Amino acid sequence: MRDDPQVTFRQGRPGGPGIARTIALAHADGEYVKILDADDQLMPGALARDLTVLEGDPEIGWVTSRVLDLLPDGSTAGFDSDPEGGPIERGAVLEHWKAHDYRAQVHPASLCIRRDLLLALGGWMALPASEDTGLLLALNAVSRGWFIRDYGLLYRKWPGQMTSQTAHTDSVEREARMAVVEARARALDSFQWRYPTGNCRALAAPARHVRPPARRRDEAAARVTAAPDGERGCA
């Protein structure tokens, strides 16, 4: 991949996935940022589907898609709580996450985000884990999202991943992470700042009816930032 002119490789001092992703924003100059953890795989067509939604409706700030767990034996397993495809209204992710033991109904590892919105929120949270869930809830606090029912990601499950380590499930740390993730989302909501700040509805056609030309989708594609591992919610 280092020989691919579309891929820029950077390496810095250790700081965890949240810091790695946020510092990588300095090298991402596209309109959108697609998350891809180092041990996961994009499904064919995932980027094109994400961009179709974001290019088609400027009121949508972020997109997620269905995810399949890729197990060590090569088999896959789906998620039994995927929502219907379409818009995700503000606050819906926090409500579900809070009611289901800190598990969101959409997977933060599948996010594709408008870069200006991501920067306005300060990137990923400076947490030892759950930084992607923190970002997902922050996004949902200020903007509408979209869920794509097509599978967009193979999420690798293996013994060495961060979410399989004992420290990740330590109850004291987990409660602290969840508390600050929730507090940030509620604080953002209380400030009543919304994305987009103007009225874009009259300018936008529904995303499901808009399919940008392939050349435009390719030109708009963001660089992909990779990080060691993500998670659905914070199991």
Image: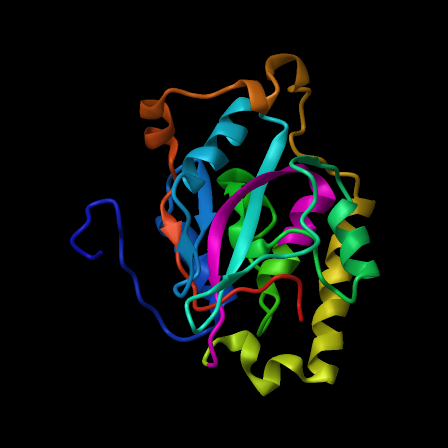
Q: Which residue is drawn at 49% across and 70% down?
A: 157
Task: Judge whether residue 171 can be spotted in this image.
Answer: yes
Instruction: Specify the quadrant of the image occupied by residue 104.
Output: bottom right
State the image coordinates of residue 21 (x, y, percent, origin top left).
Answer: 45, 59
**Magenta-highlighted residues:** 136-159
Residue in the picture at 33% in, 30% down: 219
Q: In which quarter of the image is residue 144?
A: top right
| Residue 192 belongs to the span the image colors magenta | no
In the displayed structure, 101 sits above or below 60; it is below
Depth order, front residue of 200/84: 84
| Res. 123 in view | no
- The residue nearer to you, when weighing 22 against 71, is 71
Please, which residue is most extreme toward the top here?
202
- Residue in the image at 31% along x and 67% along y: 11
Q: Position of residue 92 (x, y in %)?
A: 77, 45
Was residue 148 drawn as part of the magenta stretch in this picture? yes
Identify the residue at horizontal 34%, vertical 24% (top origin): 214
The count of marks equals 0
Screen quadrant of the C terminus: bottom right
- x%, y% of residue 124? 56, 58
When the figure is inspected, residue 110 is found, relative to residue 210, above or below; the finding is below
The image quadrant of residue 206 is: top right
Q: Quadrant of the N terminus?
A: bottom left
| Between 178 and 82, the one nearer to me in the picture | 82
Residue closest to the far left: 3
Q: Where is residue 67 in the image (x, y as percent from the top left)?
A: 54, 53
**Colour mode of the rendering:** rainbow
Side of 169 relative to 186 (left or right): left
